[in-house]
Image (spheres, rainbow, N blue to C red):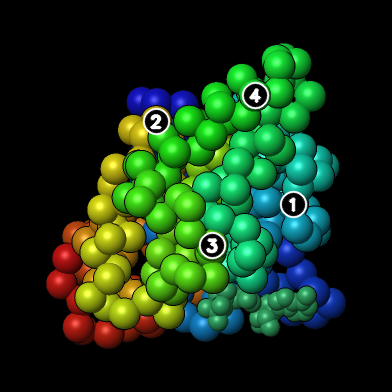
Amino acid sequence: MTAAILETHALHKSFGALTVAQNINFSLEPGTFEALIGPNGAGKSTFVNLLTGLIPPTSGSVILDGQDVTALSIESRVKRGMVRTFQINTLFNSLTVAENVILALDEHHGQGWRPLPSPSRRRIIREEAYEILGRLGLDAWGNREVKELPYGRQRLVEIAIALALRPKVLLLDEPAAGIPSTETGTIIEVLESLASDLAVLIIEHDMDLVFRFAQRITVLVQGAVLARGTPDEIANNDTVKAVYLGEGIHA
Ligand SMILES: Nc1ncnc2c1ncn2[C@@H]1O[C@H](COP(=O)(O)OP(=O)(O)OP(=O)(O)O)[C@@H](O)[C@H]1O
């Protein structure tokens, strides 16, 4: 069995008397597409915030690529490969799509980048940006300002920027939210085309999308893991059906 790229051990978070993560033990293997689902207020965003370091846990630990990162900053976790998609409102709307990705690449290469003559460096980074845009079917949009793009494409730019940071673990918060159902197929194709060694965890309310693409599903209810398994196992789990899915899901 492949070693997990991301694990949590008894991860626990309380806000005063309210417990929003209850001793969560979780693991994610490289190359896995996993979905985190659950009712509103189940604690999905809180769990991702604990993973990324946006909020500290009350107790428990987060292990990334074998290292305990629980006490590390968001930036340190990003450098170690845990990347969350940036929301549209963090994109630079008046810059082009390519420029947005180039900024992320500059950030990624940071001090580790060997000082090359500036034009060479720009050309290499630009090629790298277009390689990422190509993977997302965005290369034809590279010279367009972000604000000119349809909403669905802007959401793909979020993913492009995240990929520029060379993640080992990619956390996607509702990548299909606000996108017409006719366009969610593009998102699925993109997710499926990502590198086979990348681990992806998405929070998603669109159950069609979840059951079409996820290899594993974790169901969170009241801050606790109610069930974890393949789409078939989750769709046929009586407790999950009773508490969350109802009878309408067929994997
Ligand atoms: N900073 C905070 N202080 C107090 N309570 C909080 C805080 N952040 C989240 N909560 C509470 O934690 C619970 C879980 O919220 P969270 O946003 O993680 O759920 P969710 O599953 O992501 O919900 P949704 O699907 O609606 O986005 C909610 O009851 C919420 O009100």
Q: Residues within 10 Å of mark 4 (few under 14, many from 20)?
A: few
Q: What's the CA distance linking mark 3 and mark 2?
A: 31 Å
* Of pointers 2 and 4, the one earlier in the residue sequence: 4
Give the residue at mark 2: 197
**Residue at label 4?**
119
Depicted 246 relative to depicted 37: above or below: below
Residue underneath mark 3? 145
Sequence-wise first label, 2 or 1: 1
Q: Is residue 106 left or right of residue 84?
A: right
Under 8 Å from ligand 1: the CB of mark 1?
A: no
Mark 3 Cα shell of 10 Å, populated few (<14), some (14-19), many (≥20): some
Give the SS element for disc 1: loop
Q: Residue at x 71, y 73 (%)?
A: 19
What label sits on residue 53 in the rendered view? 1
Residue 235 image-quadrant placement: bottom left
Mark 2–mark 4 Cα distance, whole angstroms, equals 32 Å
What residue type is disc 3 on? Glu
Residue type for callout 4: Pro
Q: Which is nearer the eye, 205 or 122?
A: 122
Q: Secondary structure at mark 4?
A: helix
Q: What residue is shown at x 23% (from left), y 75% (from top)? A: 182
Q: Cβ–Cβ below 8 Å for labels 3 and 2?
A: no
Q: Nearer the viewer, residue 89 or 221?
A: 89
- The disc, 4 or 3, on the residue closer to the chain's N-terminal end is 4
